[in-house]
Amino acid sequence: WAGSAFDYGFLLHTSEEATATVALNEYLSSRSYLAGFSPSRVDQEVFELLHRPPAPQHVHALRWYRHIAALQRETPSPDSSIKGKRVQHPWAAPAGSNLPKLRLYNSLTRTKELFVPQNGNKVSWYCCGPTVYDASHMGHARSYISFDILRRILMNYFQYDVFYCMNITDIDDKIIRRARQNYLLEQYREKKPAAAQVLQDVLSARGPFQAKLAETTDPDKKQMLERLDSAVAAALGPLQGAVESKAGEADIQRLVLLEKAKDLLSDWLDAQFGSQVTENSIFSLLPKFWEGEYHNDMDALNVLPPDVLTRVSEYCPEIVDFVKKILDNGFGYESNGSVYFDTAKFATSQKHLYGKLVPEAVGDMKALQEGEGDLSVSADQLSEKRSQNDFALWKASKPGEPSWDSPWGKGRPGWHIECSAMAGSILGESMDIHGGGFDLRFPHHDNELAQSEAYFENDHWVRYFLHTGHLTIAGCKMSKSLKNFITIKDALAKNTARQLRLAFLMHSWKDTLDYSSNTMESAVHYEKFLNEFFLNVKDILRAPCDITGQFEKWEAAEMELNESFYERKAAVHAALCDNVDTRSTMEEMRALVTQSNTYIASRKSSKLQPNRMLMKSIALYLTDMLKVRESLCSIPGGCLQMETTVMPYLKVLSDFRESVRKIAREQNVTEVLQLCDVVRNDTLPELGVRLEDHEGLPTVVKLVDKETLLRERNEKKKMEDEKKNKKEEAAKKKQEQELAKLAKMKISPCDMFRSETDKYSSFDETGFPTHDVEGKDLSKGQTKKLRKLHEAQEKLHQEYLQTNQNGC
């Protein structure tokens, strides 16, 4: 009460009760006396000072007196107004439970860590983008769909404010080499060399290529090179023959060889003339084209665009400044116009550590040289380094390479520095999440960490490093350099973007995913499974009822399903908190749909409608979860606006058809029933409408996309045709067997062996063989075996004669 907030203990010194009452009323008229749940010591003492309730004219004092009296459960006076007053029972807060919190697998610790953004609810995220020199493939899709799923879940489910930055690598050794090769090969083709010249040039190019093949030890790469060489060899022969015979088809064979040998010729031309390609624009056309193709592919996959996209070619001044500061901080050195990062100096500094992600890979020369690029690992360039572990921050440009001005001369950025400078420019000295493919951990991401922490002079440039798993194709390693890849366009020609996303959702984002027919079949079946559920729920919700009728009594079945529904929701939440485990999430959703389908089937078998509100709640929850992952526009199965418009008309048509079918069955008018089947099987599927007839129940109307229905119809027809063909083949085989048996039955036992003169030379009077083809007596074993055959034929022939006799 007022004891802690107010001090009216002065009343204790007032001896006159009437005077004290007046003073108390005046005091309480301008102060609150409801500041707590129990009387203070002063309240109690003043209350005891008064022997009776204050007079009614002292309103505030009387109200205070009654509150104190009620709380004490006393009746201090005979005043009936406070007699028997009950007090409010004390309330205790429930114990509650600890909800799971989001944990992410952090490559920096190789364990799942509690996710705590650095700046409240905002999440800063940088993702390594593609090196754009060729078509985007399913390896790219593995990373970018997976990160899109993670990004959407963090934004839409966990409600984080995600700021997502991604780069485009448009300056790189691979891009430079490919741009030069494409340019030189195109020039070669434009000259239209004669067949003999092409033949000579390909033979010249094949020499160094075969030498390279002989030196290759990597089995996958060797196999790829062998395939190329075999294709060239197969095309060489026909052109050689055409040139020697001066045949008219030499020009056709010339074009065939040019296509098969383009990789060999490109390498050969680049080795001779690559240094003469100096125009920077030649090196920008290739990445600009493939970047456009990449964005088209991401749009087709429904991958959200980044909030910020950075290109290396647009950040060269920032990269130069970044390198300067690393030099100023003492962690780099210049050598022959190039600048290298001093890994030894960095590793021995007190607050830094080199190789945070993959310490066991430090010193791996093969990985380090791949990180430097094909054009940067000559003996001269390697000798410029103080240590083989050092890596290029800035590369002095050689003839045939693009270049930008720098304090160290004409040059271009190293690979690793690109991401550090661009991410640092946008996200600053520390980011929450850095993402990339598993194969980028070393040296790329370890070098990014080192040079960025050398620049910002901290040890926490990245708080959480997320790496997506590899992608294999039917169990085999996928690699663009090995020409073993499936482009995103090829994948989308076989499956929809949603099906590809479902396949990714059904696997862990950080583990290897095998892209195969089995994987995609599972995704297609899951999609169909969900779609059918949503269509069934829509049909339930369309059943006519008034506004109060939609709220139905819950029985044991509804209580059981609802309890399972909440258990599944809790399991989904726990799975998403556990490193965004979409695989377990999808299984929980499958289990919920399966249980719901069982409930629906049980109600319908009892000729009862499923509970509308419960089914609606489950369907909306599943829809929301799918929206979280892939931003669906609505429940799968069609546009809600269109459905609202056309469904009343379809219902009228369905009811009319059902009435016609009923009359046709009663009057046995098969032609009308067949026409009703044509409407269901042929006409309506062309309009995206599926009718499902159920014995004793109303026909179910479903809006499904036309392509799905036509595919289902074709598959059904295919199965029916296969079944029919199988039946016809079985009947034909049976007929052939019967004819063969009849033909065999016609043969008299006396004649069955006489035709086999290649086996037997003599027979007895019954036609039974006695000597083999060489005139030797048959052995007892042979005779016994042949006797059994003879007796069986005798029985068959007798059966045939008996049948004919009875027929006559």
Image: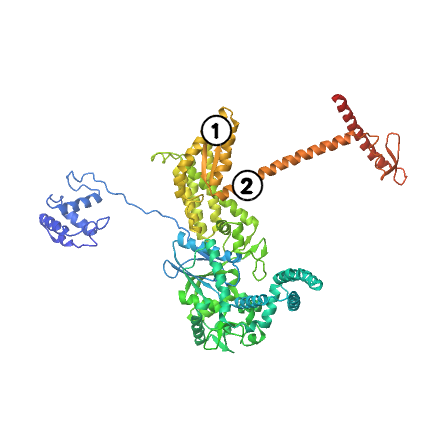
Residue 98 in the image: above or below residue 729:
below
In what element is the residue under mark 2? helix
> Which residue type does callout 1 highlight?
Arg
Amino acid at pointer 2: Asn
Answer with mark 1 or mark 2, whichever residue precedes in sequence.
1
- Gap between marks 1 and 2 measured at Cα: 25 Å
Residue extending farthest to the bottom is 336
Q: In front here: 645 or 80?
A: 645
Give the answer, above or below, for where 745 lies relative to 706: above
Nearer to us in this view, 512 or 578: 512
- Residue 31 visible from this viewpoint: yes
Q: State the SS at label 1.
A: helix
Location of residue 380 in the rendering, given as x and y in whole percent from the top left corner = 57, 76
The residue sitting at 43% across, 31% down in the picture is 655
What sort of colour scheme is used for the picture? rainbow
Q: Nearer the viewer, residue 262 or 95?
A: 262
Q: Which residue is mark 1?
A: 661
* Res. 525 mark: none
* Left or right for 203, reference 38: right
Q: Which mark is residue 714?
A: 2
Residue 172 horizontal/vertical position (percent): 51, 67
